[in-house]
Image: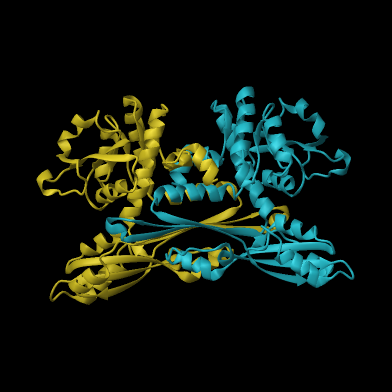
Chain colours: A cyan, B yellow
Amino acid sequence: MIRLGICGYGNLGRGVELAVRQNPDFQLVAVFTRRNPENVKILTEGAVVLPISDIQSYTDKIDVLILCGGSATDLPVQGPEYAKYFNIVDSFDTHAHIPEHFRDVNEAALASGHTAVISAGWDPGMFSLNRVYADSILPDGKAYTFWGKGVSQGHSDAIRRIPGVKDARQYTVPIDAALEAVRSGKDPELTTREKHTRECFVVAEEGADLEAIRQAIVTMPNYFDEYDTTVNFITEEELKRDHSGLPHGGSVIRTGKTGEGLAHRHVIEYKLTLDSNPEFTSSVLVCCARAVYKMAQEGMRGCKTVLDIPPAYFSAKSPEELRKTML
Amino acid sequence: MIRLGICGYGNLGRGVELAVRQNPDFQLVAVFTRRNPENVKILTEGAVVLPISDIQSYTDKIDVLILCGGSATDLPVQGPEYAKYFNIVDSFDTHAHIPEHFRDVNEAALASGHTAVISAGWDPGMFSLNRVYADSILPDGKAYTFWGKGVSQGHSDAIRRIPGVKDARQYTVPIDAALEAVRSGKDPELTTREKHTRECFVVAEEGADLEAIRQAIVTMPNYFDEYDTTVNFITEEELKRDHSGLPHGGSVIRTGKTGEGLAHRHVIEYKLTLDSNPEFTSSVLVCCARAVYKMAQEGMRGCKTVLDIPPAYFSAKSPEELRKTML
């Protein structure tokens, strides 16, 4: 049994707890929270909820700690800090800052003799794996990543910060014509606008200037200005009824050529269609916790990413069984 | 530079030679053949063609030897034999016999201190990887593998052995309705007949009994009797003009559920569309040769499969570059 700790009990932490139920080689030992533990109800009998300040008293009771905080402010601090005491897994997803987060966690883990996996999930994570495999197999090629249709939490949050907005949900939508052009092997050059559209569902405060909100959204730099964005104003009830889920997904596609005169064309596509973004991410985190446990047992120390993990380490099955049944 | 040897110069061996041109970290040193070397023309200046009996004189001149023979009779002998002298990669694809081939190669490689990767390619190979990842992430789920549309060499050969048949080409074709039912998350139970059809293009000898040939094909045990099979008689010219390529591909799909009451559904699909089956397989073999080279340098000995290889080892790029650009 792999004894697991969860640090942070939002959508992701709860997703990890649910995933543990589907993986009988894990035992959830403790959930650590910044909230008052008395107000945090978990689903797992026998597991305890503790204030995050108690975490160091669990160093000998937990094999792997999964950090379920956010990438903006939680993980850059928690990763290096808790790698001093635990083998850890996180889902750090700010792509541009991965090298420095890796460095910080690696230093802490090497110094303390622990094993860490950062940036696990689906992007970064499973999408990254597929980018590396496909790029390696087809060096003369082009790579594309499409996201959606799915809810972008970051974009939804950005809309919520606009004056007059009560609540909002933003969907990233891949453009079918672009996807089809890529899949057909046309190797198109696609602008940001040609790859995705953005659909917004907004609940406005009473009396708010809807046109001003719409303008504030579609012209917002980085978030919306480079996209064709549609804004729909709906009621709070409609938002709750029709947009309470967190679906997501997307495709990593590589097209490449081989052979004499590069005459032969190949298309590799990895596609995810997810009802629940946090639950799927959590399921990947649990697999990475299993891998961390195995790597730690083998004496592999320091920070790793999914790119460093032998695929068999994701699995609860033995190498013999995998060769016999899955190869 | 990784110094490479190729053993066997058919479609696969030639594919490896072509793939080496696209991977500047490799140098092709020698091609070993059972044919008279004078009759084997290769494309690579500076590389030599030698009789397979000379192979042991190259133990110090080659870092990795890629075995490009067949799974029926070549690889079960060559794998254990050449793992005594070289780090090797093969594409052994008789799924049922992988455990014993693994055992034989592993014993030889461990005894001699070499590193081997067996069963590389796309199935077994990239499809296996994706089965393991998806099975691990979504333990409560169903797995499907569809092949094609593509040429099955084994089925084409089986038709050619029928009296009165001069030449033949067989396509394995996935049934769209089955694929769509799986992708939509309906978790269908599919019989062999419901997943694929088989299309045969046959050139008959002059005066042959076409109906007898048709009957011999569609009733052939294991190969055709469990499928809906169509047989088209065409001329030799038509076969050459329309069916000289070796396209293939397929999809590995896993559908699974997560969350409270397993209410959330997810679909993972890995899809290949290949103009040239042997060239794509060869491209995977070259990546595995790179991985074998790295594993050997790190002191990892014995037999491995793609399930044991950290994904970053497929790549010519450094771990730092991969983290910065691909994660």
Picture layout, residue B289 above or below residue A266:
above
Query: In the displayed structure, does residue A194 sit left or right of residue B15?
Result: right
Q: Is residue B245 visible?
A: yes
Q: Please tell me which residue is depicted at 58% across the width and 29% down the height of the picture.
A: A302
Q: Is residue B100 visible?
A: no
Q: Residue at x 38, y 30 (%)?
A: B296
Query: Which quadrant of the figure contains the C terminus of chain B?
Result: top right
In-image side of B153 versus B37 (left or right): right
Q: Quadrant of residue B172?
A: bottom left
Question: In the image, is B277 to the left or to the right of A309?
Answer: left
Question: Closest to the observer: A219 or A206?
Answer: A219
Q: Residue A288: give x, y in percent of width and height.
A: 60, 40
Q: Nearer the viewer, residue A96 or B307?
A: A96
> Dividing the image into 4 quarters, which one contains the N terminus of chain B?
top left
Q: A120 or A41, which is in the foreground?
A: A120
* Up/down of A127 relative to A44, above or below: below
The image quadrant that residue A82 belongs to is top right
Q: Percent from the top left, x then y, of residue A195? A: 56, 64
User: Could you tell me residue A142's position as x and y percent?
Assistant: 44, 56
User: Where is residue A102 drawn, in percent x and y?
Assistant: 60, 36
Residue, x 74% and y 62% (percent of image)?
Answer: A169
How many numbered marks, from 0 up? 0
Q: Observer-nearest residue: B320 or B143? A: B320
